[in-house]
Image (spheres, helix red, strand yellow):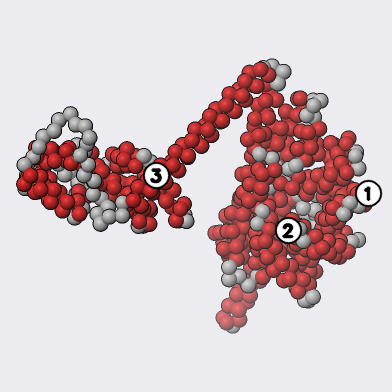
Amino acid sequence: MQKGLFFLFCFFVFSQHFFSQNSEEKIFSEIRKTYEKKAIDDVDAMVQVCRFIGQAKRTSNVIRLLQGYRDGRQFDKNNKLAYADSAIAVSLKYGTKNDISRDYLSKGIIYYFYQKKYKLALDEYLKAYNYSKGSTDQYLQHKVIYHLGVVKVHLGYYEEALEHFQYCNSFYKTKLSSALLENEKFNYKKAYYNSLHQLSVVNRYLKNFKISDSLSHLGYQLTLHDNDFKLENSYFLKCKGISKFHTKNYSEALRDLKQSLTVIQLKGDFAWASVIYYYMGRVYMAQNDKKNAIASFNNIDSIFVNHYYIVPEVYSSYNFLIENYKNNNLKKQLYYTNQLLKADSVIAKDYVYLSSKLHKDYDRQILIDNSESLELTGKNRFRVALFVILITVLLLVFFILRYRKDLKIKKQYYLLQKKLSDQITQNIVTVDEEAPQYSLRKTFLAPEITSHIETKLKKFETELQFRKKGLTQKSIAAKLDTNSHYLSIYINENKGMNFNKYMAYLRINYITSLLNSESKYLNYRMDALAEECGIASRANFSNLFYEINGIRPGDFIKKRKAELGIS
């Protein structure tokens, strides 16, 4: 009897818990049914989404709370990042690695699609990629790889991006032939069409036009008359329009571009809208319809003004507008020149790879000069002209002086080389004995003293004893078993110079010979070279080298490296 009562009690407690859970889940399910099929960014869904989140908080249901934040991220266009951060916070605390990966990926997509902040998007994609490692969710892994490819396209790494999209496209295509649930099939179809579109775009950038045309035609046919994929169909139609422009089929190109623009604008994809406007403008230019060409290019500027965003592909539209107003509307010419400078700044910041290419076509410095010139036109033309002339003269003087300096260095280098080649003796560092033809004073030393100093000094030179730092006339005289007075007289009368100059010649001749004959010394620092030949300071070494050789050590090293083909 007691066992029976205990069983009934346990059943009652369990059933209460079970039915309570079912009731709770039913509430969540009923709330979510009111908005789950609404279009992305439909703000009308947010009333029920907030109700869903509130219910999750009241019941401490972290799984439903995470779902609620993800729903808020999907429908609240103005607060997507806030909901994305909330979802990440819950995932990091309670979720799996797959949850964390999905939420970082979604935040990256917000940066990419809604804000066009590619560097920030890439940071989030890389976090998503790290959390997706080892995951069994292949759809998630390939989605991360796909979005990494998208960022690489916008940074100009087309070859790398192509590998991403080929890899993803192959996977999605294979999965479509598998048995899938309805929502899974939709997700895989969408992913397949998106990767197909990116393959078409990247192949066009890489000038693989036949492949690009084939892919865009395939995608267009697959999505035609499918209401679930109107946007994807418009992307493929846009590609077809651009292809027809390149084959000079202007009427059909314009038709396809206009038709694709309608849906793309409705979905708020201003990036591709600007590309469509660009090619519409190019078509109008080819048809000599200047008015509509200007209107199309102005639409690109409007997108740039509203979103501070520009695609490198449409950059040259500003060149057309600047040229158009060059001689008839100074105000508009200045406006578009400044806009181009701003666009250049945005591109240089976000498009590291493409930025350098654009600079070749329209040099930034010329734009700055033109902008300053335009602002001053009509106010102070004479001063501007004078300034330009002054700059030109200064540049000319600079280049003339530079040219003369280079010539002098070249001449001194070859003179020094001749001197070095003439010094083919056993002791390359010896200072030649040369009694001067004229002397202010002549003091004769006894023959035995002269012979003694000569012998000792030759040994001093041959054994490279001059390389020691801190040598003085007195210390060397002591080493030679003579006195500093006799040594001074000998050097003056037989070397034709004073003691300090004699030591400088020995040391510089020695180091010059080393630099010329042993390439390893060409990579030494100046202070190391000074140390090698016994000179105390780098500055003193450089000055003495120049005084004796007529060329700076740095210039000699550069010339010698160039001659030997050393980088």
What count of labels does the image hold?
A: 3
Give the CA separation, mark 1 to mark 3: 72 Å
| Residue 414 shows in this picture | yes
Q: Amino acid at mark 2?
A: Leu
Which residue is depicted at the point 89% across and 51% down? 248
Image coordinates of residue 67 in percent, x first then y, are 67, 58
User: Label 3's element?
Assistant: helix
Give the CA separation, mark 3 to mark 2: 53 Å
Marks 2 and 1 close (CB-CB < 8 Å): no
Q: Is residue 242 left or right of residue 479?
A: right
For the view shown, which residue lies furthest in the front direction? 437
Q: Amino acid at mark 3?
A: Leu
Which residue is depicted at the point 29% across and 47% down? 509
Residue at mark 2: 206
Dot 2 or dot 1, earlier in sequence: 2
Q: Quadrant of residue 97?
A: bottom right
3 vs 2, front mark: 3
Marks 1 and 3 close (CB-CB < 8 Å): no
Q: Is residue 118 left or right of residue 46?
A: left
Dot 1 or dot 3, earlier in sequence: 1
Q: Amino acid at mark 1?
A: Ser
Image coordinates of residue 153 in percent, x first then y, are 69, 55
Residue at mark 1: 251
Q: Quadrant of residue 547?
A: top left
Which residue is depicted at the point 60% across and 62% down? 129
Image coordinates of residue 545 in percent, x first then y, are 32, 42
- Please rate how many residues cluster around mark 2, counting C-alpha atoms within 10 Å: few if below 14, some from 14 to 19, many from 20: few
Residue 415, numbered circle: 3
Relative to 225, does residue 262 appear above or below in the rendering? Answer: above
User: Label 2's element?
Assistant: loop
Give the camera-side residue of 530 and 312: 530
Quarter of the image with the N terminus in it: bottom right
